[in-house]
Structures are given as structure tokens and as C-alpha cells.
Amino acid sequence: MAKKESRLGVILAHAPNVSAIDEGLKSELSKKGVVVTTLNHLYNWGRSSSIWPMQFGLACCAIEMIATACARYDMARFGAELFRASPRQSDLMIVAGTVTKKMAPQVVRLYNQMPEPKYCITMGACAIAGGPFIDGYNVLRGIDRYIPVDVHLPGCPPRPEALLHGLMQLQKKIESQEIEKTAWYQKGLKREYPVPEFGPRGLIPKFNPEVWQPRAKDNRKERYGEPILIGKKIKAPDLDAETLRRASGGPAK
Amino acid sequence: MRTEEIRDHLQSLDSSLRLRIVLESLLVENPEDLARAVRALKSSPRLKIDFLSSVTAADYLDFLETVYHFYSVELRIGPVVLRARTRRDDPKIPSLCGLFRSAELQEREAYDMFGIRFEGHPDLRRLFMWDNFEGWPLRKDYVQEDSDVLESQDLAWLEKNSIHVSQELKTRALDLQARGLRADAQRPAAEGPANSGAP
Amino acid sequence: MKNKTDTPLTEDFDTQTLQINVGPQHPATHGVFRMDLTLDGETVVRLKPVMGYLHRNHEQIAENMTYAASMPYTDRLDYFNSMSNNFGYALAVEKLAGIEVPERADYIRVILAELTRIVNHISVIGFLLNDLGAFFTPLTYAFREREKILDLFEEIAGSRMMCNYFRFGGVKRDLPPGLLERIRTMMDVFPRFLDEFEALLTDNDILCLRCQNVGVLGRELALNAGLSGPMLRASGLGYDIRKVDRYSIYGRFDFKVPVGSKGDVYDRYYVRVLEMRESLKILDQALRQIPSSGDIISRKAAPFLKAPRNFKPPVGEAYGRVESPKGELGFYVVSDGSPQPWRYHVRAPSLINLTVLEDLCIGHKLADAMVILGSIDIVLGEVDH
């Protein structure tokens, strides 16, 4: 009996017109075990299907991130199940949860420590813009004030399906990158983002103008209506008077 | 036990305690007596208070107040609520850490948020905010920063790190600085605190 | 002067303690908790917890909005148990405003709170095993069961995690048809899973070696430090607010309060397993007793569902507490007669349970410190609120 041999040959052509090769010829070749592809495609295919995220949870969204990695949603299907605890070993930072002003310097530092190429997904409304906690004195209104973000993932918290969708969007982005133009092979690459410092009332600086700029006009009110916060009060309740009133059985105010 | 009974009971244990009923709680009129009142609660055979559940503070504009919720796990009694008031400009309350260790973190939290100094606390530092943070954020007159407008210290920092700042942002920041205003979410400092009722 | 390199390794060998920092980004700190540790070799001699990395100003925000608007924020306190947090806040405000809860709503509340307890305890055990080194596999099984309950929550409230389902005086909407049967189906399957889980863990040699006599917490210290929930009960004090306060309708159910004997990590693990079984018992009784129809929100509170700014409780204060899966969750609310609270405070069990972390860890190895932290069961959203 003849031994069936299975062989796979890959022809890599680093030429711009190789993708223009006839589709019929391509499929004919692939039946013979020869795959014709571009280096670009192979490079991006490898990167996008083995993203190693950083095991880095901040708040509620982190639990949904864990749920995504668990059996039911199974992030491993997309090659991104290998959560690394060290930023030095990871490609993707999922900022899952509220970034407070106290935590923001650490997040920026972690991002700086990741090797190129690196990507960032903000998971949940808090990481995008402060979310429901936007009015807090210790809440950073979005991590994109200090580091560049590739995919924003809205929700509070986003469902695991949404995280998978965000991951797929990131894969699309990776696949559209070109090896000759990628920033991390260029000379003089500087992708260290300055780490903010603690000031007396918040972080210094309040944002990095090279990464983020405030909107010219704040149209939150026009878009979303009256703010949910009512505002501060100027008259304290008089609990002593209320005690006396209760004791004397007087009418309630 | 009703609040009046608890008051009379405590005063029978320690006759020098001055207690006043506020709603369903007992106000220790002289905050220095707080530790003595708690000791009386602990030693009382009828109450046997052994669990300090919650320690918190509140800002009533004229004064600051701390509120304590006690329970007796053994006798299933509670809550017995004590409160103590202190001046707003120099708030001082004796710490209960020596009697109940559960006060440790909660007093630190109250210090962090209201600036009440708990005297006798072994490690009174800010709990949540960083050490060089200024102000007491849960006081009603705390004004938080506007996080969309750069201020002069931001500009100095950005310049030191050689980060380009657009002219528009610079002008806004310098304009604020020239007018002596802070970029605040509510209103500028020149107009006084956001809360005009504050002392 | 003695040359140190020539000194033989004897007992008086001059060593130095080592100071290390764990967190805020660390896989074993359950979020953004930070520990400042001093080690002698591998033994912990000093431990200072540092928190605030998730301080989201819950109290400040709640004091600036209506009472009802704070309800979704309580979900995000302890994000494993949104239903229990809702319960505590609803109880406090109902006390403040003098609102009664209809019977059917009370049963729905209890059913959901007990389901939440199961979700929490099963996840905690999963995370505890993560800390013990059984990385991710037990957690995957725990999360499989958790997902089944989250599906029920989603059906009831519309959201998996942040349910925002309770309202003052009742709940948001009635249960969807057929839900009680689905809870019953879940309950039939769950004990089998628990048996399987226990068969693998409870008598497991590695688990026993790593957990028994580690982080022993005495009864007096536990009480004095204000510990509550499974932490207190593992130390031998059967103090359960469901039994003591009999809030809501817990007085109607027959259940036991599991108590540990030693107060070590193993007891804390086992108390949680037993509590899940007791929760199933409560669920079983509640499902049998729940009235098939009736109001789900009290008449007095119903108008405020659509107009939360008209809800103005009278001047006064209230402290409502529930037995959340983590411990005693209390809400202290002061009203000045306006639509927003004057003071709003959360008595967070996770935060107060951390008081004894240093006492438990001193003298143990660094690896055990992680396990002890895991057994305390903290959630940073609640610690830092």
C-alpha cells in the first residue's frame, strides 16, 4: 500500500503584487499542498490569532473578563486565553474597570512596560470615560487621557459576548496593519507615555495633550439631558429639633 | 431596651456622663467622655456590648459628628447608637481603637473623608486617597477640580517632560491663572466656597 | 570588623528582612489591593494593607443624587452580589421612610438573596483554589454553575451582574412566568455539583495541608475586630443577622447557622460550603411558600417609581443591615427631608474584615498570606467603595 504523504509547502513572496495572483491558481496550488501567501498576511495571521492579554482586572468588568475566559464563552477559541500576569509577556491590555486617579499612574506604567507591538482595549463605560462614576473626585474620566486605546468596548459591564466582539475587532485591526509601515519597526520609536503624578487635588497633568484633547464644547447636557446629580445643599438637617418635635408630637415638617 | 432606658442605665453606671437623646441615639455631649461611655457599655451586664459595627462621620456645616453603631452579639441586642460632635475647624475625637479594633480602618476612613483627628489612633493616615492629597472630600464645602482644564502646574509639568501643548489650551490655563481662579467643577474659589452656609 | 562573607552559616548568621510590595496589579490580590510586606526569609513579619485604588466615591455621588438613583451604584459595590447590596440599601431606606413590603415581593427578595449567596460562595471557593495553586480549573467549574444562576438573574432583571432589581417597597417587576420552575431545576442539579466539588476538595490532602491551621482567628479577636459573616462564624460564633434581626421574612424559614471550630482557612472554606446547602434549604421553603400572585411593590412607594425626585423621606436617620455573603452589610442614611440623602454611608464588610489581615498572616509563609487573603473573601469594589 502506497504511503500517503502529506506535505505542506509555503511560498512566501514579499512582493506587492503577490496578492494579485490568480485565485484559481491559488486554490489549485493549495490542493497540492502549496499555500501562496504574503508575508504580511502570515505575520498578521500569527499575531492576531495568538494575542496574550494581561491578567489585569480593575473592577466589576474583570469578573466578566474572567467569565469570558471560562468554559462557557471560552476565549481560547480566539487564541487569547493565555492571560499573563506580567506586562512583559503580554500583547494586549484589557483595562477592565474603573480607573481611579490613584490607579492611573500604575496603569500607564504597566502599558509602558509592555513590549511592542501592544494593544489596549478599554472594557466598560468607566474605563472609556468614567462611566457612572464620572462625577467622583477620584475617578479618571477615561484612560485614553494618558495612553492610546485601540478598541473601546461600551457596556456596564459589557457582556462576555461583547468582549469577544471587541477582541475580534482588534484582530481585524491587526490584520489591516502592514509590516513595512508598523510603528515598532521604524527608527527612533518612542512609545513611552509619561506617567502622571499625584497632585494636591488630582493628577498632574490632568491629561496628556499629545494623546487626548478636551472637546471644544461640552455638549453632554444637550445630548443626555439634565445631569443626574442634583447638586450640593446649603442647609443641614437639624436632628435636635426633630428629636424635640417627635417628643412633643408636633406636626412633621 | 428603649433609648431612655439605655441613657439612664449608662448614667447609673457612670454618673458623670452627660448624654442627650438625639432621635434614637445618644449624643455624648462632651466628646472627651466617649471612651468612658463605651467602656460603660462594654462593662454593663444588661447590655454586654461586644461588637462595634459601624463608625462613620457626617458634616452638619456647623459641626462634624461621628456616629457609632454598637451591638451585643452575646445578648442579641442592638443597635445602640452613640454620637459625638466636634468643632469643624479643629475636629478632634478620642479614638476607640483601644476598645474595639474594628474602629481601626473605619476611623482612618472618617479621617480621610472628613479630616477628623482620632486621638490615640495608632496609625492615623489617609485610607483611600494618597498622602499628599489636600482637602476633605466628603465635607459639604469640598470643591473638586475640573478635569478638562489644564492649570499652571500641569503646564509646568508638561513643559518639563517636553510635551507639546496647543496654544489654545495654554491660553485658557494662563487666563485662569491671571484671574487668580482655580479651574473648579462648581465655581471659582474667588466667589467663596460652593456652600455659602458653611462656617 | 567581621568579614561577612567568611561567616559560616550558623544560627547567628546575620540576615536582613526583605520588604516587598504585592499589588496593586497582582493576580493573587483579587483586584487592585496592595500589600506592603516585610519578610524574614519567606515568613511574613509585617503586613500593611494599602487600599483606595478602586475608591470610586460612592458616598459622595450618592449624596448628590436621588435615593432611587443610588440603587444601581449599590450593585457595583460588591459586584458578585448585586442583589444582596440592593437588599441592604432598600431595607435602610424603607426604615427611613416607613415603607412596608408586600409579601410576594419579600419572598422574591429572599429567593434572589439566597441565589446570590450561592453565586458568591461558589466563586470564592474557586478563587481560593486559584490562590492555592489549582490554577483556573476549579474556577472554571465554579463559574459554570455561576453562569446557570446568572441566566436566571438575567431573565428576572435584564442584566447578568448588575441587576438593579430592588425598589423601595418591593421589586422592579414581577417574576417572568415559569421562572420558579427553572429555579427548582437549578436546585435539583446544584447539590449534585456540590457533592462532586466536595468529593474532590473537602478531604483532599493538599487542600487540608495548605488550609488547616493556617490563619487561625480566635473568637475574641474576631468579635473585637468587628468581623462578620463566614469569617466570624468560622471562628465559632454563630452570629447570623438573618437569625438575629429576622429582617424581611427570614423568621419564617428553618435553617441552621454553620459554625466552624478552629477559625482557620479550612473552616472558612467549609462554612461556606455548608452555607450553600443551608441556602438551598431556604430556597426550597421559599419556593413552596411564595404566594402565586400579589403586589410586588407597596402602594405607598409605587408612585415614586416614575418620579424619584418626589420621594422625600422625613427628617431622620436609619441604619439597615443585611447578612450579605461577605458579612454584615450596613447602610447608614440621614435624610433632611429633601429628595437626596444628607449623609449616605456604607458599612462594607470586606473592608472591616481586612482589619485582622496582618494578625492572621504574621508567622506564615508568603504563599499562605495569599491563601489567607483569599479566604477573607474581599471584593475591592466594596473595600474601597
Image (cartoon, rainbow, N blue to C red):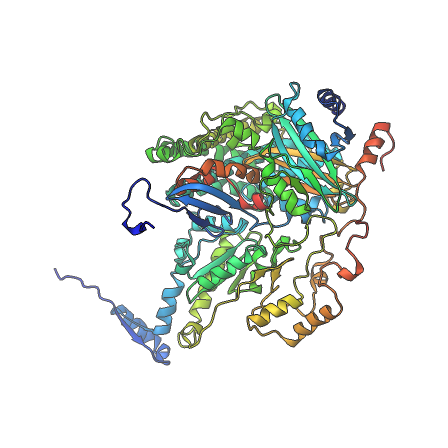
Q: Nearer the viewer, residue A182 or C162?
A: A182
The tally of labels here is: 0
Is residue A158 depicted above or below C170 in this figure? below
| Position in image of residue C305 (x %, y %) | 72, 43
Please state which of residues B89 and C331 is positioned toward the viewer in this rendering.
B89
The vertical placement of C301 against C239, above or below, is: below
Residue C323 in the image: x percent, y percent? 58, 32
Which residue appears at 45% of the width and 25% of the height?
C261
Residue farthest to the top, as pictured: B45
Q: Residue at point 41% right, 44% down?
A: C39
Q: Position of residue A164 (x, y in %)?
A: 47, 56
In this view of the protein, can residue C18 be seen by the observer?
A: yes
Q: Residue furthest front?
A: C1
Dividing the picture into quadrants, the one containing residue B39 is: top right
Looking at the image, which is closer to me, A187 or B56?
B56
Depth order, front residue of B119/B50: B119
Snapshot quadrant of residue A47: bottom left
Q: Is residue C101 visible?
A: no
Vertical position of residue C265 compared to residue A32: above or below: above
Can you say whether C374 is above or below A199 in the image? Answer: above
Q: Position of residue C223 (x, y in %)?
A: 56, 29
* Residue farthest along the left direction in this orientation: A1
For residue A238, which quarter of the picture?
top right
